[in-house]
Image (spheres, coloured by chain):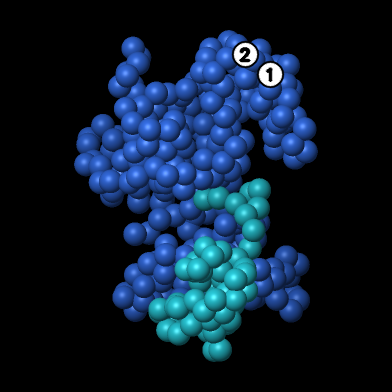
Chain colours: A blue, B cyan
């Protein structure tokens, strides 16, 4: 088997993946996305460049590079982990929430608006605190917990002038309280293989923002919600963030977001 | 998966950064100034500042 791995940086995760593949005797070719050239039209110099791979693992840091690479490869019959369709949905919180809700997977109440005025109306309807997130983004960046109308007005004004059209798509979500931690679960082939608590006194628990990870025992309830989440986005290999709200009257789990990257370890 | 052990010069503070079993394009941190560095060559070892974070970076 010949595996390609598209990467942007070699970090601890990429090294672990490479070591795991090596341990299994699998040949891996590293593909630096800064040097890749894709030939979209057939019959030219680079047209068959990636045809020899049995599967390509995508580890781009740039979301846009990942989506285009996967689309071009899949359209030419090259298998990838994950697929372009899955990455398109799971790399975008708005599309993910839509897919989860359409399949009745429990998610926080979510509203979408396109102008600051309609976004403010949506936030007021949702109530405070509310959460504003960019549809595309990771590592807890540019998340806003909106505690009152004054904060909402200020944040919406700031987002409007950030310049990128992404910030004028207002993705507004119910705030889910958490008992100091949420849960990140890892799903492969529909099976929840591992989970971690991400503990932080801050409302953002991303490990990139200081959240501490510890082992989380997998429960049947967790297996069920994670399997449904992975099926809803047609994702073979995913990680999902879940908040079990135990400090509110409406105690319930809410699957927040599968993510684009596969985690094979 | 070729790796190398040795040292390279930090382009930010010019101190020597000790490296163990690093790969081409691996990201390391300078122990003196804390800069994120990319191993752009392993023979000879060459370090450059790692790319700045861009808006659509993520997972």
Q: Residue A113 falls in which quadrant of the image?
A: top right
**Cα distance, mark 1 to mark 2?**
6 Å
The reply to whether residue A26 is in sight is yes
Query: Which residue, given by chain and number where applicable, does mark 1 sit on?
Result: A153
Note whether A263 is above or below A27 in the view shown. above
Name the chain letter of the residue that bears numbered label 1. Answer: A
Give me the chain letter of mark 2: A
Picture layout, residue A67 above or below residue B38: above
> Which residue lies at the image location 64% right of the left edge and 19% below the top edge?
A152
Residue A149: assigned label: 2
Tags 1 and 2 in contact by the CB under 8 Å rule?
Answer: yes
Relative to A85, does residue A55 appear above or below in the rendering?
below
Q: Residue B35: x, y in percent?
A: 56, 64
Locate the N terminus of chain A and report the quarter of the image it occupies.
bottom left
Mark 2 lies on a secondary structure that is: helix
Query: Which residue sits at x=52%, y=14%?
Result: A128
**Residue A165 against residue A3 in the figure, above or below:** above
């Amino acid at each position: 088997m010949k595996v390609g791995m598209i990467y942007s940086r070699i970090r601890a995760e990429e090294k672990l993946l490479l070591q795991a593949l090596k341990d299994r005797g699998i040949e891996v070719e590293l593909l630096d996305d800064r040097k890749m050239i894709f030939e979209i039209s057939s019959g030219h110099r680079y047209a068959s460049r990636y045809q020899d791979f049995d599967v390509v693992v995508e580890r781009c840091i740039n979301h846009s590079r990942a989506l285009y690479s996967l689309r071009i490869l899949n359209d030419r019959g090259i298998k990838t982990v994950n697929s372009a369709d899955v990455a398109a949905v799971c790399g975008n919180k708005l599309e993910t929430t839509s897919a989860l809700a359409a399949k009745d997977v429990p998610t926080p109440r979510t509203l979408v608006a396109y102008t600051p005025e309609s976004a403010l109306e949506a936030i007021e309807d949702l109530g405070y605190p509310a959460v504003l997130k960019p549809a595309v983004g990771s590592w807890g960046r540019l998340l806003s917990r909106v505690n009152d109308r004054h904060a909402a007005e200020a944040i919406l004004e700031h987002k409007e002038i950030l310049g990128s059209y992404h910030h004028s798509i207002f993705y507004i979500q119910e705030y889910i309280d958490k008992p100091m931690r949420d849960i990140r679960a890892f799903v492969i082939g529909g099976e929840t293989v591992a989970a971690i608590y991400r503990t932080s006194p801050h409302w953002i628990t991303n490990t990139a923002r200081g959240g501490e990870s510890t082992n989380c025992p997998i429960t049947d309830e967790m297996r069920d919600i994670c399997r449904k989440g992975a099926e809803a986005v047609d994702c073979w290999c995913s990680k999902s963030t879940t908040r079990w709200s135990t400090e509110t009257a409406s105690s319930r789990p809410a699957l927040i977001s599968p993510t684009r990257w596969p985690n094979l370890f | 998966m070729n790796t190398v052990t040795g040292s390279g010069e930090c382009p930010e503070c010019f101190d020597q950064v000790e490296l163990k079993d690093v790969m081409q394009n691996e990201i390391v941190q300078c122990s003196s100034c804390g800069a994120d560095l990319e191993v752009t060559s392993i023979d000879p070892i060459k370090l450059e500042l790692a790319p700045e974070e861009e808006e659509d970076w993520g997972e």
